[in-house]
Amino acid sequence: MAKTKAKAIDVLALIEAEHRKVEKLFAEAEKAKGANLVDQFNQIYIALILDARIKELVFYPALREYAETEQYVEEAKEEHEEVSVILEEIKALKPTNPQFKEKMSELKEALEHHVEEESKIFNAVRECISDKELTELGQEFQETQAKLVSNVKAALAM
């Protein structure tokens, strides 16, 4: 009897799906208040921290192997660091604090810039990394995500 295998998805499609998920969470957060706002922020926090860690472990090492994509890694890592700092600043605030919404807007802008830059990177990636390797990276991305999710949720609780 043949084993059924989950559909193989390339890493770029997975990253793009994560970006759409976060954009949706931001749209919901903009309408939320009180406990719902905290819940939306918590989901954004988990998604963005996971995104950064997985890319640093799986995606960026692959980009470093090609001259055409290596140049993008440092800028992307700096953008992730900026997002991480803003996330921690928001985490320290109560949703009733006027700075909470301001910082959420700042976070959204930083993320929009990052997503815009990544679309340029993706074009370069598709030029030099094979579909097979992108799919293998997608598999590794999903496996790493499954391993890290509980650690990131624990960090949020701190």
Image (cartoon, rainbow, N blue to C red):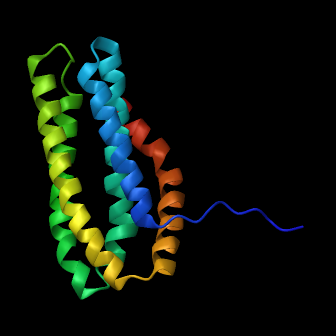
Residue positioned 17% across, 39% down in the render:
107
With 134 as the anchor, is 38 left or right in this view?
Answer: left
Image quarter where the N terminus lies is bottom right
Residue positioned 23% across, 84% down in the render:
68
For the question of whether residue 88 can be seen, the reply is: yes
Relative depth, front residue between 88 and 106:
106
| Residue 24 coordinates in the image, percent (x, y) | 34, 36
Q: Quadrant of residue 73?
A: bottom left
Residue 138, relative to residue 98: is it above or below?
A: below
With 20 as the anchor, is 138 left or right in this view?
Answer: right
| Residue 4 coordinates in the image, percent (x, y) | 76, 62
Residue 62, relative to residue 117: is it above or below?
A: below
Residue positioned 47% across, 62% down in the render:
141
With 81 as the anchor, is 34 left or right in this view?
Answer: right
| Residue 60 coordinates in the image, percent (x, y) | 31, 70
Residue 121, relative to residue 146: is it above or below?
A: below
Relative depth, front residue between 26 and 71:
26
Image quarter where the C terminus lies is top left
| Residue 72 coordinates in the image, percent (x, y) | 19, 72
Residue positioned 23% across, 54% down in the render:
115
